[in-house]
Image (cartoon, rainbow, N blue to C red):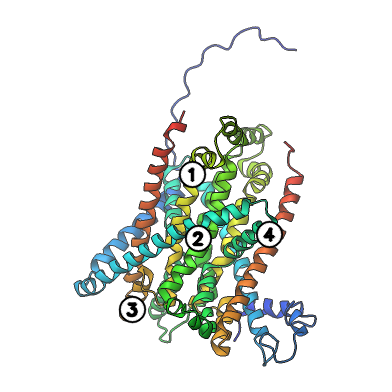
Amino acid sequence: MSVADELIPPQPAPPVQAFHWTGLRILGATLLGLWIVAGIALVLWLVDAWDIDKVTTYGPKFLSGLATTLTLVGISVTLGAVLSVPIALGRMSSNRVLSWIAYGYVYFFRGTPLIAQLFLIYYGFGSFRTELEAIGLWVFFRDAWNCALFAFTLNTAAYQAEILRGAIESVTRGQHEGAAALGLTRFQTFHQIILPQAMIVALRPYGNEIILMIKGSAIVAIVTVFDLMGETRRAYSRTFDFQTYIWAAVFYLVIVEALRNIWEKLEQRLTRHLKR
Amino acid sequence: MEPTASLGGQLYRLASLFDPFCGPLGLLNLLPEGSLLSCGDTGWGDEVARGFFVTITLALCTLPIGLTIGLFLSLAKQTEIRTLRAAANIYTTIFRGLPELLTIFMIYFGLQIAVREMALALGYESGFDVNSFVAGTIALSLVFSAYASEVLSSAFKAIPKGQYEAGYALGLRPGKTMRLIILPQLVRIALPGLGNLWMILIKDTALISVIGLGDTLRQTGIAAKVTKEAFFFYGIACLLFLTLAMASSVVFSKIETRVQRSGVNR
């Protein structure tokens, strides 16, 4: 065993490292420079390509497309949230049949592409036209908008059911036991003890799901619904001007980033009692 | 119509020997003659099967490219160098924020315009066509790498600093520390997240059908239009995607148990 005979004398603070252009710094500056140049070039190009005729023709259409996108996502996410409750309860049910049905539903809608589901409903239900006419549902499924709404609602319900289930199951057992010890009924326990805690866990996934739906909703353009993407495609097919896509990208990026930031603020506000 | 470029075509020919649908031992040969899904000229089995292979090839081509870019992005995001971090974050923000469909259209049409301009500048008159498989691979790689970089970044954060320090204490260079000490642990932590991304990638490949690639969805769509049996064929498409998802989850759980085996049991 070694023994230190004398203490190390105090050392001066290490000198401030001089700035060096290491390889990585050069790379970083180059890449960031490329982004900045690309951004400036894009703005200059958009300014240069600014055509007041096109703006007055297609600008309002873009805005109405944006409204269509937001309406579609808003309605389907709300309806999906309602539909997700029985599915999540079915997933957690001790009844084998119920939980298998709910599992099958969730697996199907999470395992297949949204676009295939949309085609299955929009084009596929046409195979049952006579049957649907007989029960009076053909009026509903004839319309692309309704089909998109239907498909999106079913799809987001499956994802939201999983979010809900994960959140409810993340609440510890002690919370159930505590509520039982206080003599609360099952409904009171769920409503006042479990759900508030589960919702905080579910907050972030719900935000992600809304963002995914906004991005995913672009595919309705393929089944002739004129949302933001649909208006973009229509404008591009008439003008062959690539800036239509750039404007669509700007719109989508702004919505998604705005939503992300709002959600972050919301989460900070709602979880401020958990901060230490 | 060849499904892909020459390499894809060769792969396709090789795969057709072991084709589980229409090969010598194919499942669809069991169907009665003249059914909608039988192979050959009468049914749509071989066309749909070809689309299915295009889907798989596209996903498998995208995966290594996307993972590599994603790894470099996540490395860039955790450096001290602010410019590098900012550049990586801009990339992620853009490609995670754009709808996948829009990215695909922008890459496809943007590439077409760029190729045309370049060809004109070089003095060629006739127009070149951009292969939709290539455009699709690029677009999906961009999206996949943006998401993968986030998964890998959070996995990097889960590895304690002591692991790096131990590597340096043993005299390993940073590159070797990364390869021998950090990456094996990283794989273990990032695997569930990457598995999710792979599932999303498989589903996103369906979007490439809109720029004309003959994948599962497009082939079933053609069959649906011709035979007027839309529900049946789109149902088949959904079933094929479900099969892929199930097969992937089996493979991933195998990989996961294999990777966890060498890990610490806590």
Say what amino acid the circle numbered 4 marks: Val
Relative image position of residue B149 (x, y in whole percent): 53, 51
Chain for disc number 4: A
- The numbered mark, 3 or 1, whose residue comes first in the sequence reads 1
Residue at the disc numbered 1:
A199
Q: Is A112 placed above or below A25 here? A: below
Quarter of the view holding residue B16: bottom right
- The numbered mark, 1 or 4, whose residue comes first in the sequence reads 4
Whether label 2 touches label 1, CB < 8 Å = no
Q: Which mark is residue A156?
A: 2
Please say whether residue B72 is visible from this viewpoint: no
Cα–Cα gap, marks 4 and 3: 54 Å
Q: Locate residue B54 relative to residue A212 in the image: left or right.
A: right
Chain for disc number 1: A
Cα–Cα gap, marks 3 and 1: 47 Å
Residue at the disc numbered 3:
A240
Check the picture and name the quadrant holding the N terminus of chain B. Answer: bottom right
In this orientation, which residue lies closer to the viewer: A180 or A220?
A180
Q: Nearer the viewer's eye, disc 2 or disc 3?
A: 2
Chain for disc number 2: A
How many marks the image carries: the answer is: 4
Could you tell me which residue is drawn at 39 percent across and 74 percent down?
A225
**Does dot 1 land on a helix, a strand or a loop?**
helix
Quarter of the view holding residue A106: bottom right
Q: Residues within 10 Å of mark 3 (few under 14, many from 20)?
A: few
Q: Residues within 10 Å of mark 2 (few under 14, many from 20)?
A: many
**Does dot 3 land on a helix, a strand or a loop?**
loop
Q: Which mark is residue B107?
A: none
Residue at the disc numbered 4:
A97
